[in-house]
Image (spheres, rainbow, N blue to C red):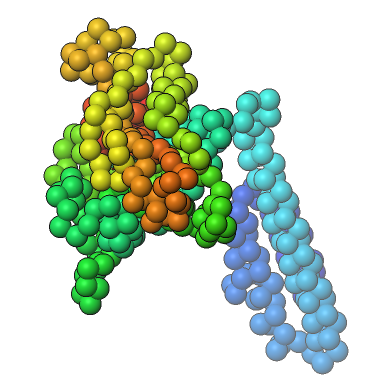
Amino acid sequence: MLEKLKNVEQDALKALDSVQNEAELETWRVAHLGRSSGLMQIFSQFGSLSKEEKPVAGQRANEVKKSLEAAFGARSEELRQAALKRSLEQEQLDVTLPGRRVPLGRLHPDTQTLRELYSIFGEMGFQVFRSREVETDEYNFQLLNFPIGHPARDMQDTYFVESEGRGENPIVLRTHTSPGQMHAMRWISAMNPENPAPVRIVLPGMCYRYEQVTTRHETQFDQLEGLAVGPGITFSDLKGTLADFARRMFGQNTRTRFRASYFPFTEPSAEFDVECFICGGKGCGVCKGSGWLEIGGCGMVHPIVLRNGGYDPERYSGFAFGLGPQRMAMLRHRIEDIRYFWQNDLRFLEQF
Ligand code: PHE
């Protein structure tokens, strides 16, 4: 029996040498360590051995079993390492290749325009002042000299957010950035009511109007309001500021013009045009042959508005203007449809 054990061990180890892969290794395990292997048959024959033979053969059989198991483990590890080495050799890694580019985001054309406006007005001494998009009727209209029922309210079709129980002061979405003028003046004048500090700010932000959506109009759009209040500010300051702005924004030779207009919160009021920078004033499709582009509204702050803001109109005067950043971006990049702005279509956004 000891002889048999020796043969079983030798045969098994020899067979193991020629095992080349996982599948063959498993076949080997079944054949040499499995239930019907030669070794297991020897275990089942122990019943026929004498008392003296049994312990010797038993010990030897266990040794053979352990040695085969150890050899199996070692061979398995060898195969695993060999497979790993092969896969590393096959993997062709060129460490000199340039890295993969991380896709870069970009700024929305409206944000780009706004930032340009902030920097131009910043250089002229205007600070950015932000105010709320959800307003009261009082701030959006009444304090700006649009009393209840004033016909000029028709110029700005309004979204009413909440009217119930609010009497004549419903909550509205702001229809323009002008209510920010009132917040700013009241905030600054409250610090020193006798001698309020001068104001020189731009107020950017979203505005909402109940409009028929077309290529030129959206229900949501943004404005950049400007406000300067101080002793002795005149219409010349307004013209000079906007003319200088137009030159910085559209080019050194850009001409500007003002046309009389009406807003309840400015007097006098004007519409502000710049010479068409596409055709140089000759007349083209973009300016519809007129040679001029409408850029915004402006005027001298109405005395009632100054008083509501805490500034005595006998001692202070001021100018205000409202610009459409999206309109400027559209003119500049020849964007034909304002609806592209908030659609978030990458085919549009990736062009800027
Ligand atoms: N708030 C006006 C509008 O939205 C624009 C404006 C602002 C006009 C400031 C004059 C002064 O139509």
Rendering quadrant holding ligand 1: top left
User: Can you tell which quarter of the image residue 318 is in?
Assistant: top left
User: Which quadrant is the N terminus positioned in?
Assistant: bottom right
When the figure is inspected, residue 337 is found, relative to residue 212, above or below; the finding is above
Look at the image and tell me whether residue 347 can be seen.
Answer: no
Relative side of 121 to 134, left or right: right
Q: Residue 16: horizontal and vertical position, in percent?
A: 70, 55
Relative side of 286 to 49, left or right: left
When the figure is inspected, residue 157 is found, relative to residue 261, above or below; the finding is below
Q: Nearer the viewer, residue 107 or 203?
A: 203
Q: Residue at x 78, y 77 (%)?
A: 62
Q: Nearer the viewer, residue 59 or 307?
A: 307
Q: Nearer the viewer, residue 186 or 246?
A: 186
When the figure is inspected, residue 36 is found, relative to residue 300, above or below; the finding is below
Q: Residue at x 31, y 20 (%)?
A: 257
User: Can you tell which quarter of the image residue 75 is in?
Assistant: bottom right
Q: Residue at x 61, y 31 (%)?
A: 99
Q: Nearer the viewer, residue 19 or 39?
A: 19
In the image as oriented, which residue stretches furthest toward the front?
314
Q: Residue at x 71, y 61 (%)?
A: 72
User: Which quadrant is the C terminus positioned in?
Assistant: top left
Q: Residue 69: horizontal and vertical position, in percent?
A: 73, 67
Q: Residue 39: horizontal and vertical position, in percent?
A: 69, 72
